[in-house]
Image (tube, grey):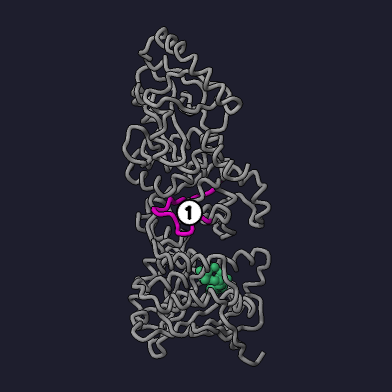
Amino acid sequence: MTATETHHFQAEVQQVLQLVIHSMYSNKDIFLRELVSNASDACDKLRFEALQDPGLYGDEPGLKIEIHADKAARTLSVRDTGIGMSKQELIENLGTVARSGTRRFLEAIAEGRKADLSLIGQFGVGFYSAFIVADRVTVTSRKAGASEAFVWESTGDGQFTVSEGPEDAPRGTTVTLHLREGEDGYLDEWKLRSLIRTYSDHIGFPIRMRKPDSDEMETVNQASALWMRPKNELTDSDYQSFYKHVAHDFGEALAWAHHRVEGNQNFTCLLYVPARAPFDFQFSRDERKGLKLYIKRVFIMDASAQMLPAYLRFVRGVVDSDDLPLNVSREILQESRQVERIKGALTRRVLDLLDRLARDEPEKYAGFWREFGATLKEGVAEDAGNRERVLKLLRFASTRSESPGQLVSLDEYIGRMAAGQEDIYYLTADGWNAARNSPQLEALKARGVEVLLMHERIDEWISGYLHEYAGKRLRNVAKGELDLDELGESADRAAREQAAKEAEGVVARLKGILGDAVRDVRVSARLTTSPSCVVLDEHDMALHMQRLLRAAGH
Ligand code: ADP
Ligand code: MG
C-alpha cells in the first residue's frame, strides 16, 4: 500500500465525535486518563499473549508508557510498547465498527440526566475523548510481531485516513494530539505530572516523562499493582483513584474491601461498591463487567460473570489469583471448581462489606440501598446458601411509616414485634399505594401488628423465596388463614360464632351468585372496616402475580 486510504466513520461514531468536539464540557482532563488507560490495556494484552508466544516481545522486552509534550509543534503524545494495532484493527477499532456502548452513550448524553462526558470510558468509546483538546489526532501503530506500521489520522469531521507508517516505528502505539487553540496548558510538564499522579498513579506499568530541563526520562507513577501493596501504605485517596480507573467512574466509591485470602485458594481481592449506579446499569444483567481477573499480576480478562453472582453485579474491582493456570479460557472459568471456590469467597466478602456498612454507616447504607437494593434483592432467589445473610441486608417499606421509602430491616421489625406475635408479616402489591390501602391489612393494623409492604416489581418473585428469617416464619398476609388469636384477639369466640350464624343466609346467597368463581365464602375476622375481601389459599399464586400473568396472555 502506498496510497492513503480514506474511510468514513460509522454514523454513531461520528455522532460521538460531534458531541465530543462541540460540548462545552469543562473537565477536559479526562482525555489523558482515557489514553493512558488504553495504553495500559495494550500492555496488558501483550503480556497476556506473550505467555504463549514470548517472541512477540522482539527486541523490546519492556512494557511502558511514555508521555511527551512538544512545545514547538504544540503536540502531546502518549506512546506505549503494548500490543499495537494492525491496519485492519486501526480501521475497525478507531472508527468503522460501533461498539455496543456507542448508541447507549449517545442516548445517555441526550437524556442528560446524570450522564456527562466524563463517563465516556464506561461506554467503550474513550479514545474519542482525544478530540476534546485536539483538532487533529494521529495514531501510529505497529502490531507486536508485524513488520509494518500504519498511521491513522483524522480531524474528526466524518472521515479518517490510513497510510503506511515509518519503517522504524517501534512496537506499540503512539497517539499524537495536535492541540486546539487555547489548550497549551497540556504542554506544561508540571501540569501533566500532576494529572498523571491524580488519575494514573496506580497503573501497573511505568509511565515515563522527560525530567524537567533535561533529556533524561523518569517514571512518574507508582507503577506497581495497587492491590498488591500493603493496606497500611494506602490512603483513602489511593483507593478512590484506583476505583476511578477500574470502574471508569468519575464519582467516588462508597466502600471497598481489600483482602489477601489464603487457604484452599490463594488470592488477593480489592472490591468496590460504587456510590452511584453506572449509567447503563439496567442493561448490564446480561453483559456483566467490572471485575478484572489477574493471575499472578497478569491481566487475563473481565470475569465478573464467572466470579460474582448476578445479584452482586454492581461490584467493581480486581481479583488476582495465585493458583489458577495462566492459560485459562472463559470456558474453563465457567466449569472450574477453583473458580467456584473463589466466587464463594468473594460473595462472602461482599456480604461482609455490606453488613459492616449497614451496621457502622447506616446513612451510607441507605444510599447503597437506593442505588442497588433492587439488585441485591435478587439474591434471595438466586443464592439459597446465603439467603439468611441477604435477608438481613434487605430494607422494607412498612405500615409504620408514611412514605414508600424502604428503611426497615427484618431485625428492626423483630425487635418491635407486638406482644405474642410469632411471625413476620408482609404484603406484596403493585405499588406502595395499593399496598398500604389493601383491605388485607385491616385486622393486623387494628391489632397494632406491623406489616412490611413489598411494592416493587421484583418483590412478587422474591416473595416465593421468603420462608423464614432468624427462626421466624415470614408470612404473606394475602395467603392462607391468619390465626389472629395468638395476637391477643379480643372479640370472644362465641360472639364470632354468633355473627357467623347470622351471616349464614348472606354467605349462602353469595355462594350461589359467585358459584365456581370462588372456592369458598367464609365469615372472617380479617377485616374491620371493609365488608369483604378476596383471600388466597396458602399455596395459590398471589393476586397481582395472577394479574400479571393474565396481562401477559396466560
Ligand atoms: P475501550 O478502551 O473501552 O475498548 P476505546 O474507545 O478507549 O474503548 O478504545 C477502542 C479500541 O481501540 C480499544 O478496545 C482497542 O482495541 C483500540 N485501542 C485504543 N488505544 C489503543 C492502544 N494504545 N493500543 C492498542 N489498541 C488500542
Ligand atoms: Mg479505553
Q: Identify the amino acid type marked 1.
A: Arg
Vertical relation: 80 (above or below) 517: below
Is any atom of residue 104 visible in this view?
A: yes
**Would you say residue 168 is visible in this rendering?**
no
> Dividing the image into 4 quarters, which one contains the N terminus?
bottom right
Q: Is residue 59 left or right of residue 187?
A: right
Q: Which residue is nearer to you in this view: 434 or 171?
A: 434
User: Badge 1 is on which residue?
Assistant: 316
Residue lying furthest top in this view? 494
The image quarter containing residue 436 is top left
Please determine whether, in this image, residue 1 is positioned above or below residue 105.
below
Foreground residue among 441 and 338: 441
Q: x, y percentage for residue 105?
A: 48, 66
Compared with 97, 295 (above or below) is: above
Span of residues in magenta:
266-283
Q: Is residue 269 magenta?
A: yes
- For the point 46% across and 50% down, the residue is 271
Please identify the residue farthest to the bottom as the structure is shown.
3
Left or right, 514 with respect to 106, comes to right
Q: What residue is shown at x 65% (from left), y 68% (from top)?
A: 54
Q: Quadrant of ligand 1?
A: bottom right
Image position, residue 144 (x, y; %): 63, 75
Mark 1 nearby-residue class (10 Å; few <14, some 14–19, many ≥20): many
